[in-house]
Each structure stands twice: as C-alpha cells, then as structure tokens.
Amino acid sequence: MDLHRLTRELHVKNSTKIVMYVGDGLGGLPQQPGGRTELETAKTPNLDALAKAGVLGSSIPVLPGISPGSGPGHLGLFGYDPLQYMIGRGALEATGIGFELKEGDVAIRANFCSLDAKGNISDRRAGRIPTEESAPLAIKLRAVKIPGVEVFVEPVKEHRFVVVLRGAGLHGSVQDTDPQITGVPPLDPVASDSQSKKTAEVAKEFVRQARELLKSETKANGLTLRGFSGKPALPSYEEVYGLKAAAIAVYPMYKGLARLVGMDILGKAQTIAEQMTVLEEHWQKYDFFFIHYKYTDSTGEDGNFDSKVKRIEDFDAAVSRITALKPDVLIVTGDHSTPSMLASHSWHPVPTLLSAKFCRTDGCERFGESECLRGGLGQFEAKHLMTLALANAQRLGKFGA
C-alpha cells in the first residue's frame, strides 16, 4: 500500500505540536580513524539533553549508498518517497522565490562561477559572491533574447539565480553543466531524451549570450546550469497528514520545497535567532513546523571541519528556544551528510533524534553518529520519519481491526 494512502486513512486531528529541526548536511566523518565527527566534536549540551530523554537513530535519505541532493533529502524527511517524486532543483529554487511556474515551463537553478583565461572553472561559486553583487548581474542577464522562447532571470541568494524558459516544446530532461570540479570548463547542456533537445539548444544559446554579458566581470564571469525541471505536483501535508504546516527557512530552495508540499512560508528571517523569533510568534497557529538551518552544510562543502563544528554549536544553542515552547514531538536531523573531509554530500546515514512523551528511550547519552548507530530507532529510511512523528503526537489511528 502507498504510504500516503495509509496516512490519509489513519490520521486524526488533535492539538499536538510537531517541530522538525533540520541541520542541512548534519552528518559527518572523523578526520582520522577512531576520531570524532564534527557533531561529536561540537559542544551540544541542549541536543545531548534531548538525546538522554529521547530516542536516536540513523536515517537513510534515499537508499543505502546513494548520495542525495538537497531536494530528495528533504522530500524523504517530509515523508515523500524521493524515488517516486522526482523534483528538479530548478523548480525548487523558482518556487522558493515565489515564481509561479506554469505547465510547460522549464526552471533551471543557475550558479555564477569564476572562469580563468582558458575558460576553465577556478571557483564553482564565484567566491560565494554576496547577494548585493550578484543580484544586479542576474538582472543584467535579462537582456538575453531567444526567438520563440520567453526567458525569465531572477536573483536568488549569493551565487545562485534562477532561469525559467517558457515556450512550446520544452522539456526538462537536460543534464547539468556544472562538472563539480575546478580546472575544467563548464559542460555543454545535453538532452537526456529526444523531447528535451530543443531545451538543450535554448540553454546553450542562453549560456553563450550570458557569457558575453559577463565577460568583463572579475569574479562572476561565467555560469553553470543545474536541475532542469518542469512544474511538479505533490499532495499537501494537509491532505496526507491532516497537518497545518509551516516552514521557517532562510534559503529560497528550502522555502520552495516546503511550499510544494503545502507549507506556509513564515517570516523573512536571516539568522537562526530570527528564525526562533518567527517560531515563537506563530506557535499557536500551526500543527507542524519545519525549521531549516543551512550552514552545517555549506561549511562541510567548504571542507572546513572547525567551521562546521562551530555552526553545529550555533545550531545547538537555538534548541532551548524550541524546547521552551514544549512541543509534543521534536525531531532533530539532517537531509543528508556532508562530511568536511569529502567536501560534498555523501551516502552516510544521518544522525536523527526524536524527543516525545511517548517515545521509548534507549540509554544513549549524546547526540552524535556513534550513539545514533546504537540508538533505538536503528537505521531506517527517512521517508518513515513523518509516521514516527505522527504516532508520537498521537495523530495516527489504529490500522486494521
């Protein structure tokens, strides 16, 4: 039976509150065998207190051995099978900034990058160019004109922007142009099927004109295109779980994914402290809150172990403001692991903590990868986390007679 068909039948309404607190890329690895991971190195008194009172485990975002992108990673956390619901990053990014996609549109997540004199990528994120510098460049790219196709270009944040192509005969099965390494040129857009050949040609022309417009820039003189995708359709949290749900996130992509599953996007917080204030202000209005924290991932992607440790400590410090509200269920986890020694998303199971009145505690003392491996939740697919949350909130009825 489809998981959501089951939750549709079993969910019940009550006044309980569920919080899902997500440290993006939370999981890590020790720098040497037998050492501690970033999470285990960090001082996390609030999370450790929850670990003692709750139950730990390790979630598998997609399948064992598969390194997920942020989209599939979050879909799993939200209880949507990421192998069933394929959503491209472009659609997430566009939706996250409030762009209304139409049927037939192709949305693309774009990155500014730095190119050397030979046209090779020297920095995949243009030195993480600040938004105040990148936004005017994205707007400049609106000068690109392609016959028969409407081209929309929207700034997002830092090195990220969105391109939406609108016209007849466009399909989103086009491979990314980011080679994921430096010292080589960006790849050409290549269609993965015959229906998407027109999109690949349009994208190639967009890149050609954009490169010309950016050639005088010192940092952001190039671009890569990722996550070509059309408008997705997902059932909402209200439909499948009976929850009035809200999201508190800083980065547009995560707002986009939350909006696609029917969450309201709350506030305009830019720091974790501001996110907690938004949570407090809206506490009485919603059943479920998704709170997203990005910087555990970006420091991991930068390969900076010490910075990731510090960001985890900041993540922990905010926990006391959540627990002060007395949620009935509090889940702390990540959408995937981003070990700083790999400087990329990885396949490793993600540390997961569930704290609730009715959870069966497991004797674990601290929130870290080693403790999670022996925790009472065991290793489980992330798509089952929402049913665990609903059960502990007493929002699921009995299955069968």
Image (cartoon, rainbow, N blue to C red):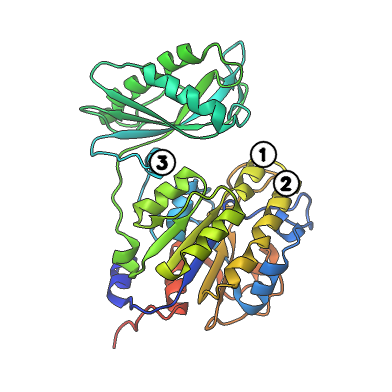
Question: Gap between marks 2 and 3, in whole Å?
Answer: 28 Å
Judge whether 159 appears above or below 37 on screen. above
Q: Amino acid at mark 2?
A: Ser
Percent across and percent down for residue 101 are 29, 39
Q: Crowdedness of circle 2 by 10 Å Cα count: few (<14), some, many (20+)?
A: some
* Residue ranking furthest to the left: 168
- In front: 66, or 311? 311
Q: Quadrant of the N terminus?
A: bottom left
Q: Is residue 145 left or right of residue 15?
A: left
Q: Is residue 91 left or right of residue 279?
A: left
For label 2, the residue is: 307
At a point 53% along the width and 12% down the height, the residue shown is 215
The secondary structure type at the circle numbered 2 is helix
For label 3, the residue is: 97
Circles 1 and 3: CB distance less than 8 Å?
Answer: no
Q: Amino acid at mark 1?
A: Asp
Circles 2 and 1: CB distance less than 8 Å?
Answer: yes
Q: Crowdedness of circle 1 by 10 Å Cα count: few (<14), some, many (20+)?
A: some
Nearer the viewer's eye, disc 2 or disc 3? 3
The secondary structure type at the circle numbered 3 is loop
Which numbered dot is residue 302? Answer: 1
Sequence-wise, which precedes: disc 1 or disc 3? 3
Sequence-wise, which precedes: disc 2 or disc 1? 1
* Residue 100 location, quadrant: top left
Question: Gap between marks 1 and 3, in whole Å?
Answer: 25 Å
